[in-house]
Every structure is written in C-alpha cells, then in structure tokens.
Image (spheres, helix red, strand yellow):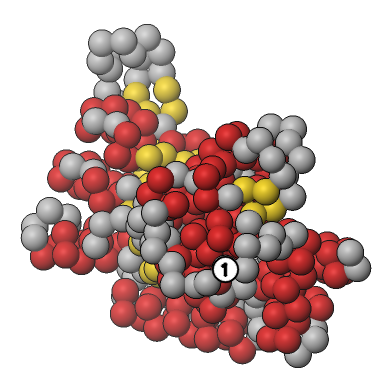
Amino acid sequence: MTAFSSVETAVEALKAGALDYLIKPLDFDRLQETLEKALAHTRETGAELPSASAAQFGMIGSSPAMQHLLNEIAMVAPSDATVLIHGDSGTGKELVARALHACSARSDKPLVTLNCAALNESLLESELFGHEKGAFTGADKRREGRFVEADGGTLFLDEIGDISPLMQVRLLRAIQEREVQRVGSNQTISVDVRLIAATHRDLAEEVSAGRFRQDLYYRLNVVAIEMPSLRQRREDIPLLADHFLRRFAERNRKAVKGFTPQAMDLLIHYDWPGNIRELENAIERAVVLLTGEYISERELPLAIAATPIKTEYSGEIQPLVDVEKEVILAALEKTGGNKTEAARQLGITRKTLLAKLSR
C-alpha cells in the first residue's frame, strides 16, 4: 500500500511476493477484493494455526466449529486487516484477539487491550487517546493513551458496540487518519496499530437502528469472525472440562480423578448461556466443593444439575484416563490415524497425545 504510484515500484513489490499493489486513497471495494484474494491464497497454501499456539491461548477443541475458527485465525492473522469479532459473552473473543496478534508480524510488539463498556465517555476518551497534564480535574501528569501504547503492535477494543456517538466519531477519525490527539492538546501523534474489535451486539442492527455509525462499522468490519457458542460445539465440552479440572485441581492441591458419567452428561446437555466462562466457573466450584475423587452432580451448580437428560446410566464411574483415550481415538479415526493432525485438532502436542495413549 502506497501513496506513490509507479510501474517500477509495483513490479518490485510483486516480485518480492506481494499479492497486490494498492494506491492511496484506498478504494474499499478493491481492498475487499485484495483481502479475499489473500485469504484464498492462504487457504491454497494450507496455512493453519499450530496446535501449540491454539493450546497456549486456551483454544481447545476438535469440533468442526472450533476447527473452522482456528482456520480463520490462521488465514487472517498474517494480514494487517482490521478484524471484528462477534459472539456472545464468554465465548473467548479475547483469546482469538491474542491468537491473531501472536501469529502476526506484529507479535514482537505490544498487544494492548481495553474494555470499552467498563468506562464512561470521558474516561474512555482519556484511556484511548491520552491526556495532557491539567486537562481535567485529577490529571496531574501527562498520560499516553492506548493507541500510542500499542504503536507498532495491536490494539484490542472489547465491547466496541457500547461506545457513545461522540466516541464513535473520535475513533473513526483515529482509524482513518492513523493519528490521535491527547485530551487537552492540539498536537497530532501518528500511530501504527492493527485494530481488533469485539462485541456481543449485532452491529448491523445497531446501524439500522441509528445507534452505531455506518462508516465506522465498515471500517471495523473489514474481516469478520463469528464466535461459536458452547452449545454449538458440545463435543468439545469433555476436553474443556478436563482442561479446567486439571487447572483447578492443581491450584487447589486436590487429587481429582475425573467426572462421574452422569456429571459429564449433565455438562454436555446443559445449554451454557454463559458459554466457556460459565463452564470454567462451574468446574472451579465443583473442585473446591469436592471431598472425594470424582466430580458428581452434587458438586455442580443447581441449574446444571437440574438439566433433563434422556440417557440411561450404568452407575459405573469411568476413569478420566479412559474418557481421554476415547476422545483421542475418535480424533485419530477422524484424521485417518494421523497423530500430528489429531493432536492439532485436540489442542495438545503430539508428545502429550502419545503419552495419554500409552497409559
């Protein structure tokens, strides 16, 4: 992308491996076509998010919905495109933002995060753009804003759909001009950031209702990533439950062996309105309350324990190691016996997969 057009520079860029050559001011239809071409190229070259990266960010699962999400991250991460992540609360939007940053060319630069819903308009303005000393009561020294802190790296703005009309205008200007002004200053500061935004709101509906600026929506929605809810990926619940069980068992110094079959069925059949965050909290509670070796329905929150299930139970307790082995064998069958691919889809390393199989 350049403001200066010449045949020589275009040829040099394409020889160096560029897929296209864009001239400023940008034609957004052309930009969209270029991004789609880049994503198609990435698909053809077989790019994927390494299993180690997925596991590192807590992105665990082998369901089709999870694999689609991981493939999207792998395709989008290398670009500098603005990303809008949409999904219900608790689905892991910040995990996706962290993975996008870690797998990008900006990974050695800062990832700066801010929850826009947690601050009122004046505080949000100061947090985003910074302020001068004396700009308002309590501003006893100059402060750099999040845009400046993220210079060269990535800025993740969570709950972007909650910002006020005035902040929408200021944010739009910062994105368009790639520069910001501290509160109380007329000086502009150039910034180079990749912007990732997230929201639980349907911004297209917010635009139609007049609550969100259409031009800002288009600026944010260059690449859209849709987060699956936990009930859309129920087959991942045993893996996630095991992940959280191990974490909280270690943290609370308890020798927990696993779940009773009925407890696991309750976890799988519950609808999880709070998604992964609710599952995490439920497992932590169960581990804290547990006095035996296996988590049963008694340790689960009432809303989960009351979930109707049609399955009949033998009453036998299935050891956690057996549950893990069943999941791993299913993954191996799905991948035609490819252990490396099975490990990637399960969000674990090949070494861990082999160790679990040998038990």
Tell me if residue 186 comes above or below residue 279 in the rendering.
above
Tell me if residue 96 comes above or below residue 15 in the rendering.
above
Give residue 321's position: percent from left, percent from top: 78, 61
Determine whether, in the image, residue 40 is placed left or right of residue 141: right
Give residue 191's position: percent from left, percent from top: 45, 45
Tell me if residue 12 comes above or below residue 215 in the rendering.
below
- Label 1 CA crowd tier, 10 Å (few <14, some 14–19, many 20+): few
Instruction: Name the residue: 58% across, 50% down.
Output: 296
**Quarter of the figure with residue 125:** top left
The residue carrying mark 1 is: 313
**Quarter of the figure with residue 10:** bottom right
Tell me if residue 303 comes above or below residue 72 in the rendering.
above
Give residue 308's position: percent from left, percent from top: 39, 63
Instruction: Name the residue: 56% across, 60% down.
Output: 262
User: Secondary structure beneath disc 1?
Assistant: loop
Determine whether, in the image, residue 323 is placed left or right of residue 311: right
**Quarter of the figure with residue 18:** bottom right
The total of numbered circles placed on residues is 1
Give residue 286's position: percent from left, percent from top: 56, 41
Q: Is residue 92 visible?
A: no
Determine whether, in the image, residue 32 is placed left or right of residue 96: left
Instruction: Name the residue: 82% across, 67% down.
Output: 353
Amino acid marked by disc 1: Tyr
Viewer-proximal residue among 185 and 226 = 226
Instruction: Name the residue: 24% across, 30% down.
Output: 120
Determine whether, in the image, residue 310 is placed left or right of residue 337: left
Q: Is residue 113 visible?
A: yes
- Residue lying at the far front of the rendered structure: 314
Viewer-proximal residue among 61 and 57 = 61
Q: Which quarter shows the C terminus?
A: bottom right
